[in-house]
Image: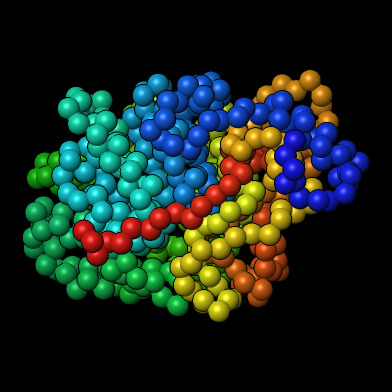
Amino acid sequence: MTDDTPTEGPTTPDHTSTDELAAQLQCSSVELATTDPTADHADLDPIGDALTDARIIGLGEATHGTREFFRLKHRLVRYLVEEQGLRLFTMEANLPEAMALDTYIVHGEGDPHEALAGTHFWTWRTEAVLALVEWLREFNAGRPLDDRVRFYGIDAQYTAGAINYLDEFLTDADPSLRDELRVDLAAADDEGNTNDQYMSDHDPEATERLLNRLGTVFEERREAFAAAMSERETMMARRCLRVVEQARQRRVARETDGIQDSMIVRDEAMAENLSWILNREGTDTAVLWAHDAHVCRTANFSATADRAPSLGSHLADRYGDEYFALGFDFLRGSFRAIGVGLSSESELDTWSLDAPPKNSITRVFSATDHGLAFFDFATDRADDRLEEWLTQPRAKRELGAVYYGSDGPSENEKDGQAAHNAVRILPEAFDGLLFVRETMPSLVLDNSEH
């Protein structure tokens, strides 16, 4: 065992020593060689075996700003593409805006730096995500079109990309209708901005009018639009209208019922969009790149289990065992996040966490010899003490793009470092877990250089 295990006393509250649990976890988990995506991936075979029967593979991340998580996920995507024929990649990014990344990856058209900047999220505008995008383009180059990896966003937080697509679609399909709707199209466009509640900053009345008008038009003139344009373009235009509606529903939920209800709407929307993509592409397997709180099979970490079903819980309901949720955990190091309730209010900066909570799986992992490991919750164990220990709620590291100060997050009783650990029955929430002992912050790209 390592000599840097956080001290907590000889036993857990369940009267099983941390060392005993760690010994079992070490035997039941698989040590990985590296997070380097360019390395040989033979050591990933145990993960590949666990994923063989999965149709949707949720690749989580315990923070949105950890370089090792992104590099390890890149490595896993490469393995799945090369060894298991994966051809569909989806991401927690706005659906219409991600089309620019798909165009680059599939056809080599456009600028990947601009495409990443266009996703609205600093979390994806990093050198690690860019490296994945570039590799996907390299893999696709010269392959038959139907054998290339496709890239989709599944999120619906903004209206800008969807409105832009609808504007261009109507300009070609029906210029007179576009002119009729010109004012409402402009008012419904949030231009990638949010209001003081961090919701899409669109004009409510104009957006509602646009949704009603175009909803009727698309129902009545679907065949005419498909003949004038194409079936694929018409389907995407209808989906973009749905994204506008989803962003609108999320904002209404926030203003009417609060932040937890807006998160419910968001995760429902992402699940719906992912199912739409799977049906559209007709593929057998897809990877989903998102935060642990979204990919987990149970509740979103920021709300109670009964009130906030996650994206992953919707996928588990729809696809059962064909959905595999792979979560992440880490011991120490730094990560990038926006500080809230600190001297650097709302500033993107580098942060770290204190020792993990007592009785957390993080602490048990820290007592193993593993620096980088994969644990499959379905693994048979010679000794059932670890399995029994895991049947109770246990903490693991978990925060998104925000690091909370001593005041804690709004509408959440937890404060400070406690807000950055989520408590769940882990085998119910995840099918597998990846542990990274040491982390570094993600490297955000300076777009001004491109």
> Residue 216 in the image: x percent, y percent?
26, 56
Q: Is residue 213 left or right of residue 120?
A: left
Q: Is residue 163 above or below residue 70?
A: below
Name, please, the residue furthest toward the front: 3
> Residue 86 in the image: x percent, y percent?
37, 28
Between residues 300 and 12, which one lies in front from this camera angle? 12
Between residues 266 and 382, which one lies in front from this camera angle? 382
Rendered residue at 39%/71% (across/down): 194
Q: Is residue 139 above or below residue 393?
A: above
Q: Is residue 139 visible?
A: yes
Rendered residue at 33%/58% (across/down): 445
Q: Is residue 123 left or right of residue 375?
A: left
Rendered residue at 51%/76% (across/down): 344
Q: Is residue 277 left or right of residue 218?
A: right
Q: Is residue 262 visible?
A: no
> Residue 141 in the image: x percent, y percent?
20, 31
> Residue 274 in the image: x percent, y percent?
41, 42
Location of the N terminus (image quadrant): top right
Location of the C terminus (image quadrant): bottom left
Count of residue discs: 0
Q: Is residue 280 above or below residue 161?
A: above
Rendered residue at 67%/38% (across/down): 428
Between residues 337 and 283, which one lies in front from this camera angle? 337
